Image: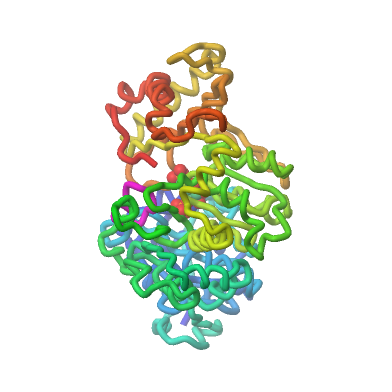
Amino acid sequence: MIRTIQTTPFDGQKPGTSGLRKKTRVFMQPHYLETFVQAVFDAIGGAEGKCFVVGGDGRFYNDTAVQIILAMAAAQGAASAIVGQGGILSTPAASHLIRLNKTDGGIILSASHNPGGEDEDFGIKFNMPNGGPAPEQVTDAMYAATKTMAQYTTLDAPDVDLNTIGTTHLGGMLVQIVDPVTDYAALMETLFDFPAIRARFAAGFTMRMDSMCAVTGPYAREIFENRLGAARGTVTHATPLPDFGGMHPDPNPTWAHELMAEMMGPNAPDFGAASDGDGDRNMVVGRGIYVSPSDSLAILAANAHLAPGYAQGLKGIARSMPTSAAADRVAAAMGLPAFETPTGWKFFGNLLDANKCTLCGEESFGTGSDHVREKDGLWAVLLWLNILAVRNQSVTEILTDHWQTYGRNYYSRHDFEAIETAKADQMMAALRAKLPQLTNTETHGMTIARADDFAYTDPVDGSVSTHQGVRILFTDDSRIVYRLSGTGTQGATLRVYLERYEPSSGNLNLDPQTALAPIIQAAHDIAQINANTGRTEPDVIT
Ligand code: G16
């Protein structure tokens, strides 16, 4: 039976950098999730006759949310839904299913790298028929719809059995429960040289993949252990748990500390990697050496032709503005177009759809290509494995060779978390107000060439996004960027991005924090971080 439920709008259902993310208990309030789902359907012209992919990273509330979404889609006339078994789909696998089945989009449940559990975080986002996150015009329409929401419709029916693969019906809607891994793993086999990687594992190459009790465990086991022959136990924390086993599935040196300790220890494997809650982020580590995400993008771009899926070469390389310029140097050397977009994977979608670029990447541990419209953690790990197998070199050798060829963009991000929102806003406002006076001034022995607030005009559809981060650009190509995160759920997170270029003739082996010391000092002074926030030290350094 279809039921119409009266409701009243909730405050603050504005999607951030990647969908709506809140504390799980906020989502568990009566009508909260339903209001947002209704707004999604309203913003895309209704669900009638459409087909959607539905799934999430398995965090607490995932299964309940899947049932709510299916019941609403069925009530509103959706033709069919493709759902990952157990309600599980990694974000890149969901993007692939949307594209493979030519659906009308998908609803993905995840708060990505944020912890999961009843007292932690939950999230939801809509991906378009191209498999990519909804662009700003669409998320703005969703937000507008939430503000006037008065009712939604749903179906009174027993829950769908999410655990049995096969086809069933919910009201008039066809529901297909699919294995979450099969199609994704098949796609990976088309892109990479599996025989070469398999041969390398057979010859004794060792790896540790930390899935952090989040969604990639089953994918990683199937691909690395079953298909590529990596030793059993290569994948750790391989069972997705509703609270991620208490882990914070954010693949960076701070949160993936178990992996870091092993990789920096005496018996480190040849290669290490970690992924996040929903499987779209990755961190890559060599024996005794950490690879910054910005360097990873540049190295993948320079070597992608070694993988069969990219043997034809790249169309272009895109990075988010706060990501280091290392990838731009590769693009210049290869004569490829380079693009600089605001933070948020959604900004890469148009470039990929228009065939303007093949590889995209972000400093926030995201790398991907035109094979889907999301960043893809395991894809990045596989491309690294492919490159390591073909070049038959260690991660250290590949990094060193890269810096000797292109020079090194020393890079780090400092995060100041859970700052009082009003204080963070005040700090950014004061910073923006003083930008015009900064040009040509000196600080810590460096001269500021330009200071601005990054704005982006999409080269495909001409849409303009302003206030995407304050940039302080120095005459020697060094740079400071300040942004407030759009993915946190508690107060504000200030991200300070720091970069300095060292040519290949210079010292390429400094600790980034040492290499960046004057820039870090300048960043504190210019924004008056301590005076404005009371903080002297960052909570996370990447
Ligand atoms: C999302 C976006 C990324 C962005 C990251 C961090 O990733 O898709 O493009 O770089 O958030 O954003 P912010 O600096 O605003 O917190 P994910 O993995 O959280 O979906």
> Considering depth in this image, is 71 or 420 the residue closer to the camera?
420
> Considering depth in this image, is 491 or 147 the residue closer to the camera?
491
Q: Please report the residue visible at 45 percent of the width from the left and 47 percent of the height from the top.
A: 291
Q: Position of 113 compared to 337: left or right?
A: left
Which x, y percent locates residue 283?
A: 43, 53
Which x, y percent locates residue 66?
A: 43, 72
Which x, y percent locates residue 328?
A: 63, 39
Q: Please report the residue visible at 60 percent of the width from the left and 68 percent of the height from the top.
A: 193
The answer to which quarter of the image holds residue 100 is: bottom right
Residue 23 is one of the magenta-drawn residues: no
Which x, y percent locates residue 448?
A: 53, 17
> Considering depth in this image, is 249 or 390 the residue closer to the camera?
390
Q: Please report the residue visible at 33 percent of the width from the left and 56 percent of the height from the top.
A: 259
The answer to which quarter of the image holds residue 275 is: bottom left
Residue 257 is one of the magenta-drawn residues: yes
> Is any atom of residue 101 visible in this view?
yes
Q: Is residue 128 above or below residue 364?
A: below
> Is any atom of residue 70 visible in this view?
no
**Chief secondary structure of the magenta portion:** loop
| Quadrant of the drawing holding the C terminus | top left
Magenta-drawn segment? 249-258
